[in-house]
Image (cartoon, coloured by chain):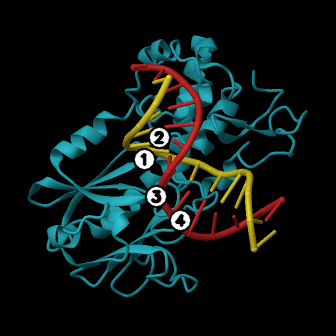
Chain colours: A cyan, B yellow, C red
Amino acid sequence: MPELPEVETVRLQLLPKIKGKPIRKIKVLHPKATGNDATFSKKLTGKAVANIERIGKLLIFSFTGQHNLFLLSHLRMTGQFFYVDEKGSIGGGHSMTREDITLPHKHTRIVFSFTDKSTLYFNDMRLFGYVKIASAADVALAKSKFGQEPISERFDIVTFIEKLAKRNTSIKAALLDQSFVAGLGNIYVDEALFAAKVRPDRIASTLTKTEARSVIAAGGKIMRHAITFGGTTFQHFKDTGGENGNYTDYLKVFGKQKTLCPRCQKVQIQKTRVAGRGTHFCPNCQK
DNA sequence: GAGAGTGTTGTAAC
DNA sequence: GGTTACAACACTCT
């Protein structure tokens, strides 16, 4: 379940590996992954990635000398980018060759072959994710739909608090709304609310300013920390070398139901359903 | 073996 | 505009 830190991990790993490499050939194994774009291969063949940006959980690829050609990629829940270098090593020599992974496999949707014989695979079991061609206008429109990111040093907490006061849903639902706050998903929302000692089912407008600040500060801190550990693997996330994220060991509440709260040591972490999602919290610590 | 559960987001509908 | 419900999908768990 890639959230902001996992997507950022993919971006940081992928960029140095593919930047400036012309695409020699593209095989679309499942057209849905490209938004059923019949021109996908033709438009991208011969182009070289200039940069990869990220906003929220969305990746934005730009190409050298192309001012109106971009790729938008969202991993949704099970999307993965795997990079195999010219020697056939998954992860481009960073990680050991993964003998347990053969590529392409039945969930590989798109194969990008570069002129240096390295290959980028887009895998997505559930086909919710995508890699789509976009114009500059498409990119601008997509960017406009995201709220502020808690990891941003320019996060405007005053505006956030004002908007929060108008929300009559749970704080969890509010934090999961990407147009309100960008980057948090189910795992990091639970972790941030635990760190801030706020119950996930609290109505957003009832949070004090201090609590609101605390939630954003915790969200930012946890996600920045997770990025330094290569993200969190809970079910499906793999980095571009097929490795799990290493932040998993630092989770305090997500998936920890029926274990003793690591902070108060008095009650067990509860799992309930808030905002239609599996939700973990300490009924003692979180108010 | 049928059915529920899993989670992100766009869209429709209120 | 806020909010909810649902669809998209394929796999695992009950």
Across and down, in percent, residue C3 comes to 54, 24
Can residue A217 be seen by looking at this rendering?
no
Q: Residue A183, labelled with which disc?
A: 2
What's the residue type where badge 2 is placed?
Gly
Under circle 4, the secondary element is loop
Query: Are dots 1 and 2 in contact, CB under 8 Å?
Result: yes
| A209 is higher (above) or lower (below) than A232 | above
For disc 2, the chain is: A
What's the residue type where badge 4 is placed?
Lys
Can residue A146 be seen by looking at this rendering?
yes
| A282 is higher (above) or lower (below) than A87 | above
Residue in the image at 55% along x and 20% along y? A213
Under circle 1, the secondary element is loop
Front: mark 3 or 1: 3
Determine the CA span between mark 1 and mark 4: 15 Å
Q: Which residue is mark 4?
A: A238
Question: Sequence-wise, which precedes: disc 1 or disc 2?
Answer: 1
Determine the CA span between mark 1 and mark 2: 6 Å
Across and down, in percent, residue A18 comes to 28, 69
Across and down, in percent, residue A122 comes to 40, 69
Q: Which residue is mark 1?
A: A57
